[in-house]
Structure formats: C-alpha cells, structure tokens
Image (cartoon, rainbow, N blue to C red):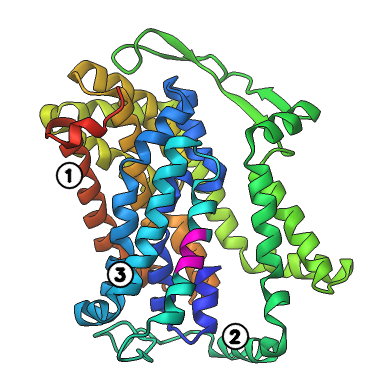
C-alpha cells in the first residue's frame, strides 16, 4: 500500500519499493495486533507483557535510527542533514510511545498508537518549521536507472486516478483510514478477541503429524511431542477486522456492494502471485519446524558461545528472511532461543525478545515482501533489483540490533535494561 501511494506521488518503482520496505522495520515485532509476541509467548512460556516490555527496550532506539537511515538511503547524507529536525521528531515521537505502551500496557496496540502520535506530531511540527530547500526529485540519489517501468500505461492510469480524486474532501479521503484504525484498535483488545473466539473457532489436529514429532534436549528442556493443530479462529483474526472496516469504509465512500465485489476481485487477480508466494513461504516455515531444520540451525548458532547474543539475533533475522513472518520466526526459534540462553547463562527473556527484534530487519528481504512490493508498484519482473537494493540495509541494521543485544547481555549500564 505504501509503495502504491509513493508511486502516485511520482516516485520511481525502485524508490517506492525500497523506501517502503526499509520503513517497514521497527514496527514489525508488534505488528498484526501483537501476533508475533503472542506466538513467541506460546512457544517459550514467557508472559506476553514481559516479552513486550523487553522488545520495547530494544526497538525504540531503532525507531529513532530508521527514519534517518531511510532519508540517507534516498537523499544522501546532505539531504538527511537538511531535514534532520523533522526526521528526529518523526523518530522520537514514534519511539517514546512505543516504549511506554509496550512496557506499561502490552503488545497489542503498540504501533497503532505510536504511528498516530508520530504522524500528528510531525504534521504539527511542519506547520511551524520548514527546510531551507525543498527536495523535488523522486529518484534515489545517485541512481539514474531506477525509473524504468514495464507498464507505463498502468502508472499513467494511477496518475489519472490520483488527479481525478484531487477534488475529494480531505475528511472523506481520511475516512477509510480512520475506520480502519478504530477496527484495528477494537480487534486488538484481548477481551474482545477472547469473546470472538468463544463465539466460534475451529481446531483440527493433523492426522499422522500431530504429536508424532518428538523434540528432545537440548532443543527443549524436556522431551515433548510437537502438536500440529490447525486453528481457524477467523472471527478474532486481525484480517477479519480489516475486512469489515474495508467494507464499511467502501460503503460510506459511496461504493455499492457489486462495485466492492468487483474491486476485491480485481485486487485478488492483481495480487495472485503475491498470495501464492506468501502461502508457499508459510508452508516452508512449517516444513522447517516439523523437519527439525530450525533446531539444527539453532544448535549450530548456540556453538558461538559468548557471541551468541549477536548470532541469536541474526537467527531471528534469518527466520523472517526465510519464512516472511516475524510470528513464524518466533514460533520456529523462540523455544530454542530460550533453551540456549538458559544453557549459556543468559536471560531467556532477552534472547527470546532478540529473536523478534532481529527478525524485523529480515522483513524487508523476505520473498513475499519483495513480491508484494513489485506488485504494488506494478514493477513486475524486477524483484531482483528490489532485493539487491534493500539487502545491504537489511543485514546492516540486523547486525546493529545484534550488537545492541550483546551490550544488553554483558555491558553496564545496558544490562540494567534486561528483564530476568
């Protein structure tokens, strides 16, 4: 969605894709109404609020860093310095609420609240402060070949649609987003989710797999049979709330039911390859879990000893890069992170949180994110170009997270931030 908006503003496909992917980092650990942390809690046995608080003592530093990194990647160092006050306001007003909500409320609404506050503060700040020079270029600094598009007619149609919608009132234009925010907020309330699950949910143990895989120490503290149960709690899923908000928003915007159905069908056709890729990557996630590949990788990383805080964080990065989901990575490696940390005398809470925090930097290079970016910007066939552009940013930021976790593990005063 962000990539499509940037395209509508005139950004080249590479700039729109790359910038959207880099920006989608620090919020990932709390994304989908706290689902990654809920999944992490389920496999580690560590309280959700405790994990939320620990992650909230890691990611806010990167929530301040990422806006600077983003502008530097697009406009260069001089371009970033020219607007550093606005960048600082955007980062700090996101990071502070992120820390407060994650530590004193829980994982469910962290980034909803943080993003609202950040956007509001930045908007007010820009009413009283303006840079000396207005940047008008929409190309990545130093790149002159990033605007080649396979489907210029599609972008022209988008531009025409943007021009046609210019007359829509600001209030009406913001209406779908406001409705979405309300529904996301409601679906993020734990009591509401429990109520919806009590109304209806479907559980189906997979024959021949459920409890057939036995995990042994040191992968787990004791021998356990791995459950394989398909849970279809559709009423409490975050996507259900988003779907309802989209239908309601469309009706209030004047769309008829047949028109909404047509638009949804067109969207499904447009994103069919993205949907297939996402499904396949989730399948790979379950395959690595039940085949023991995740345990094998984790045990190899555990051999790094004193450097495990760094490599354990990189394991989370690798998990998201492979599966495309911070939730899936946490489910894959969360239990292993806890067990390995206990063996090495580290805080299990720290390393479980590090798995999620490190994983957010892998989100920009996973296959489904790349495919979604190319689809949203209509830059089909250029997934390799997008991956090459964001790969350095992904691994560099992941290493920085690993270094920060290492400081929290061993170095004063960072060790005082750790929850035991």
Q: Quadrant of the C terminus?
A: top left
- Residue drawn 35% across and 59% down? 92
Q: Are marks 1 and 2 in contact (CB under 8 Å)?
A: no
Asked whether residue 381 appears in the rendered view, the answer is no
- Examine the rendering and report whether any part of residue 191 can be seen: yes
Is residue 196 found left or right of 286 in the rendered image? right
- Image coords of residue 255 (percent x, y): 84, 72
Residue 154 is labelled as: 2
Judged by depth in the image, the label closer to the viewer, 3 or 1, is: 1
Across and down, in percent, residue 196 comes to 75, 33
Which picture quadrant has residue 245? bottom right
Task: Using residue 93 as the reference point, say whether residue 301 is left or right of it.
Answer: left
Tell me which segment is drawn in magenta: 117-121
Question: What label sits on residue 118 in the rendered view?
Answer: none
Whether 321 is drawn above or below 41: the answer is below
**Earlier residue among tags 3 and 1:** 3
**Residue that badge 1 annotates:** 403
Figure quadrant of residue 351: top left
* Relative image position of residue 138 (x, y in whole percent): 39, 86
N-term mark: 1 or 2: 2
């Amino acid at each position: 969605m962000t990539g499509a908006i940037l395209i509508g503003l005139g950004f080249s496909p590479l700039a729109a894709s790359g910038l959207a992917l880099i920006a989608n980092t620090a919020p990932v650990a709390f994304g989908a109404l706290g689902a990654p942390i809920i999944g992490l809690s389920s496999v580690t046995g560590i309280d959700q609020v405790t994990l939320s608080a620990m992650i909230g003592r890691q990611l806010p530093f990167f929530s301040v860093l990422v806006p600077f990194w983003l502008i530097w990647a697009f406009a260069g160092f001089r371009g970033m310095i020219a607007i550093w006050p606005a960048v600082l306001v955007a980062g700090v007003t996101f990071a502070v609420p992120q820390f407060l909500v994650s530590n004193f409320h829980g994982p469910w609404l962290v980034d909803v609240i943080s993003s609202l506050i950040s956007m509001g503060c930045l908007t007010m700040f820009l009413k009283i402060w303006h840079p000396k020079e207005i940047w008008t270029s929409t190309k990545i600094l130093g790149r002159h070949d990033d605007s080649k598009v396979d489907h210029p007619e599609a972008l022209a149609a988008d531009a025409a649609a943007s021009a046609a919608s210019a007359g829509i009132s600001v209030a009406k234009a913001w209406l779908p987003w406001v409705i979405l925010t309300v529904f996301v907020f409601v679906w993020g309330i734990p009591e509401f989710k429990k109520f919806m699950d009590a109304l209806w949910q479907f559980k189906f143990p997979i024959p021949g797999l459920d409890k057939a895989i036995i995990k042994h120490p040191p992968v787990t503290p004791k021998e356990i049979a791995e459950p394989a149960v398909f849970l279809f709690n559709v009423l409490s899923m975050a996507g259900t709330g988003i779907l309802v908000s989209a239908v309601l928003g469309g009706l209030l915007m004047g769309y008829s039911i047949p028109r909404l159905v047509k638009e949804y069908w067109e969207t499904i056709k447009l994103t069919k390859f993205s949907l297939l890729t996402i499904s396949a990557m989730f399948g790979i996630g379950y395959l690595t879990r039940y085949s023991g590949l995740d345990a094998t990788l984790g045990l190899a990383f555990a051999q790094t000893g004193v450097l495990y805080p760094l490599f354990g964080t990189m394991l989370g990065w690798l998990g998201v890069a492979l599966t495309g989901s911070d939730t899936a990575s946490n489910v894959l490696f969360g239990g292993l992170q806890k067990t390995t940390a206990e063996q090495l005398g580290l805080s299990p809470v720290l390393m479980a949180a590090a798995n999620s925090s490190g994983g957010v930097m892998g989100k920009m290079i996973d296959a489904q994110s790349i495919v979604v970016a190319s689809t949203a910007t209509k830059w089909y066939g250029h997934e390799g170009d997008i991956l090459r552009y964001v790969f350095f940013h992904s691994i560099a930021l992941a290493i920085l997270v690993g270094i920060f976790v290492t400081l929290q593990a061993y170095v004063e005063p960072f060790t005082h931030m750790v929850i035991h």
